Image: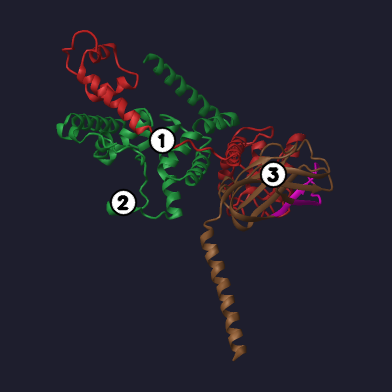
Amino acid sequence: MKRRLAALGGVLVVLMVFVLAARGARSAGPPAVRFRTVDVYIESSRPLAAYQVAIRVESGDATFLSVEGGEQPFAEPPYYDPAAQGDARIVLAALDSQRTLPVGRHRVATLHVREAGVARYDIELVAAAAADAKRVAAHAELESPKEAP
Amino acid sequence: MSGAPSTDPCPDELTLEALAAGQGDPAVRAHVAGCSACSEMLELMAELGRELSVSPPPIEVPAAQDRALRAAAAARAAAIRPRRTGRRAAVVVAACAAAVLALVAVRGLFTGEPPHRVATGDIDGDGRVDVVDALVLARALDRGAPMPGHCDVDRDGTVDRADVDAIAGLAVSIGPRPAARERQQ
Amino acid sequence: MIESGLREATSIAEERALVDRANLGDERALEALYRRHRDWVVGLACRFTGSRDDALDVLQETFLYFYSKFPGFTLTSSVRGFLYPVVKHKSISVLRRRRKLVDLQAYREGRDAHELRWYPADLSNSQLSRMIGGLPEGHREVVWLRFGLDLRLEEIADALGIPLGTVKSRLHNALKSLRSAAEDPAVRKTGDAG
């Protein structure tokens, strides 16, 4: 009998926790909308003359608004499909047939995103090439710029 | 009101409205100066302006959003203007690229071999269209090399920087890629 | 009067020059158009939606749509004549997405839940505001655009997508009605409530 009462009590406690959590979630309201930037970095084994990356929203509620260029020679905004504005997937590409980005890790673009709550992104390096148009080994990643205190 | 009351017929409401908007000829102004009815109508219009132009407190646009919208303007402008690489609007590029569906018999042009299926914009013939194809074409243009017809991706009759843009536009398109089909040369 | 006409002409010429340059890909021109109309758009959106957050959403959607019109944007009366219906429709979309609840008064009056509060909700309960409220919807909007937003008649025609002649006709009839109401002793009796 005592064991049954204890078990019942345990179930009631668990139920109360769920109810309180649900109430807490409902009363929290819709997630706050914010605008922020996400930097696109590429690190290559040879000086880079062209790159192409595909970025998508992996989780959360976010859309891409616009894109800025990065370091020279990719300082101008990269090529992208305007249909990606307001969407959860975007492909960026840039090239310079006369200049190259030095070896190492460099910021090639900055994305402007609109988020409602927490969002996570995924990046895929589609192509990277050196000045001789030969494909090179490279790595792409996203980074949030440090916010000012 | 100044001077003697006007004896001219009053202008209609639209004429008075034009006067209130800063237009109107001297005769109308002279009439209004001497007409209490017209002056009252102008005062009514001024009161409408005061009543209706009450607006909510100004909203400060968050700096991050403002920067995003300015960046979007810059990106749009960059897509439009001829860049150092002769770039055109991404939408124009995408439209041209989407409209070009024909396959090109690449090897057949030079070797007499049977036509092969090659996707539009696949300059390096590796079976995909990406930024490397655009780079290959850009380098060839830098060298002044003669270009085969299949490089005229935007079908304007010449192979130039606009075709580089067209290929890049295909590469970044998030819509369905135009399907390859065979074309006899 | 002449000076304000000159200022207006200069402003129209400036705007036309900016649009021409933006159509050629001039980044500073396109950004200047954004800066020129940003606060107007967000203020108008706030009047429509009644919410700062919704207004900021409308701001963003409006300008991304505006940018998409370049190259090839054709300026008719003014950029504001183009933007007004965009802001209005984007405001409706934002409100629909957020599924705003019908306020009780709107419900009693049988108005659509998504009806925009374009007519200033913070008007005083004055005789004039009651007179304006008594105008037909189309006349009221023309009066508001002319005297509240200070748009020219050509801009109003552009904004509402109606012929200039219709704008003039509605404005003329609205002003006549307001004038008659103002002169009506029965209306004058009620006086100002506040």
Say which amino acid is labelled 3.
Glu
Q: Is residue C4 visible?
A: yes
Mark 3 Cα shell of 10 Å, populated few (<14), some (14-19), many (≥20): few
Residue A48 placed where, x, y %?
Answer: 79, 43
Q: Is residue B120 visible?
A: no
Say which amino acid is labelled 2.
Gln
Left or right side of A101 for A53: left
Q: Secondary structure at mark 3?
A: loop
**Residue stretch rendered in magenta on the structure:** A123-140
Q: Quadrant of the N terminus of chain C?
A: top left
Q: Which chain is red?
A: B
Residue A41 placed where, x, y %?
Answer: 75, 47
C159 and B7: which is toward the camera: B7
Q: Are labels 1 and 3 assigned to the same chain?
A: no
Mark 1 Cα shell of 10 Å, populated few (<14), some (14-19), many (≥20): some
Instruction: Please give the chain letter of the residue carrying mark 3.
Output: A
Residue A77 placed where, x, y %?
Answer: 66, 39
- For the point 60% across and 80% down, the residue is A10
Q: How many marks?
A: 3
- What residue is pinned by disc 2? C105
Left or right side of A119 for A129: right
Q: CA distance from mark 2 to mark 1?
A: 22 Å
Q: CA distance from mark 2 to mark 3?
A: 45 Å
Magenta segment includes B69: no
Say which amino acid is labelled 1.
Ser
- What residue is pinned by disc 3? A147
Residue B2 placed where, x, y %?
Answer: 24, 10
- What residue is pinned by disc 1? B55
Examine the rendered structure and indicate whether residue A56 appears above or below residue C35: below
Examine the rendered structure and indicate whether residue C73 appears above or below residue A136: above
Magenta segment includes A136: yes
Tell me what hue chain C is rendered in.
Answer: green
